[in-house]
Image (tube, rainbow, N blue to C red):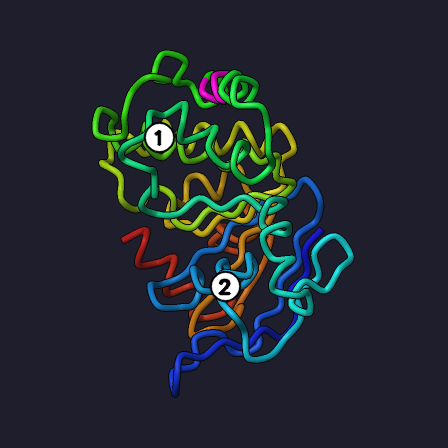
Amino acid sequence: MLKAEAIHKSYGPLAVLRGVDLSVGRGECLCIVGPSGSGKSTLLRCLNLLEPVQDGRVTFEGRDILQSRRAEAPGIRQRIGMVFQNFELFRHLSARDNIALAPIRVKGEDPANARARAEVLLRKVHLPDKGDSYPDELSGGQQQRVAIARALAMDPVLMLYDEPTSALDPETVGEVLQVMQELAEEGMTSVVVTHEMGFARRAATRVIFMDGGVVVHAAPPAAFFDPAAPKPERLARFLGRLEH
């Protein structure tokens, strides 16, 4: 479904991505892990056309989207849902209206139908009674689940998650990961930047380790986390520090 080839991204003299290659098959859940500053979040933003790249190619559903015209980018983003670290909900809108807003404004859906679909999505993320609640009335985990429902409202075929639990209280992390795992099990193609190794073990079809703006290693989770499996020394040190 998605293939990135030799992606280079710099901010002035700082090279953040240095020739990243990545592919995601339909129905796959790809988890990207690595130390802070390794380029993981920047890679997601490049895949969703939120950041320009200096060089490389991104093919989505058989089309080189980096060569698309600027006016075509919103249509591409409708097919690629994005969930950010800090929810990005509109504080003056209820959970229901946060979810319904883009289908109404961008896709021209009937408001009543969009709000009815929002109720369905709230049930899907286990918030059936929160439609009238405003973000300030919700916990961080509840807000992030509303953000997931909002992304799903555009009917994406691919979901990108940028460390979706990093801003959450430890007690609410599990409820967000549960929704993400359920979506993956239902066949939603996903790319997840995460520090949650338990989620990567359970939900990923492959795990990628990034460091210094490059992909260092990729493997199915059983091999990726197996202490006896051969792996680069940098990855072994990273996993060893997590276990310690």
The residue at 44%/39% (across/down) is 199
Which label number is shown at residue 174? 1
**Given the image, on which type of amino acid does mark 2 rest?**
Leu
Residue 230 in view, yes or no: no
Question: Is the stretch drawn in magenta largely helix, strand or loop?
Answer: helix
Region rendered in magenta: 118-122
Q: Position of residue 30 (x, y in %)?
A: 57, 49
Determine the CA span between mark 2 and mark 1.
25 Å
160 on left or right of 25: left
95 on left or right of 206: left
Q: Position of residue 198 (x, y in %)?
A: 41, 40
Secondary structure at numbered mark 2: helix
Q: Is residue 37 magenta?
A: no
**Given the image, on which type of amino acid does mark 1 rest?**
Gly
Residue toward you, 115 or 43? 115
Which label number is shown at residue 43? 2
Residue 231 in view, yes or no: yes
Secondary structure at numbered mark 1: helix
Give the class, few, some or many, for how many residues have Cα within 10 Å of label 1's Cα (few <14, many ≥20): some
Q: Is residue 39 above or below residue 1?
A: below
Q: Is residue 85 above or below residue 68?
A: above
The residue at 46%/46% (across/down) is 161
The residue at 49%/55% (across/down) is 32
* Residue lying at the far top of the rendered structure: 129
Which label number is shown at residue 107? none
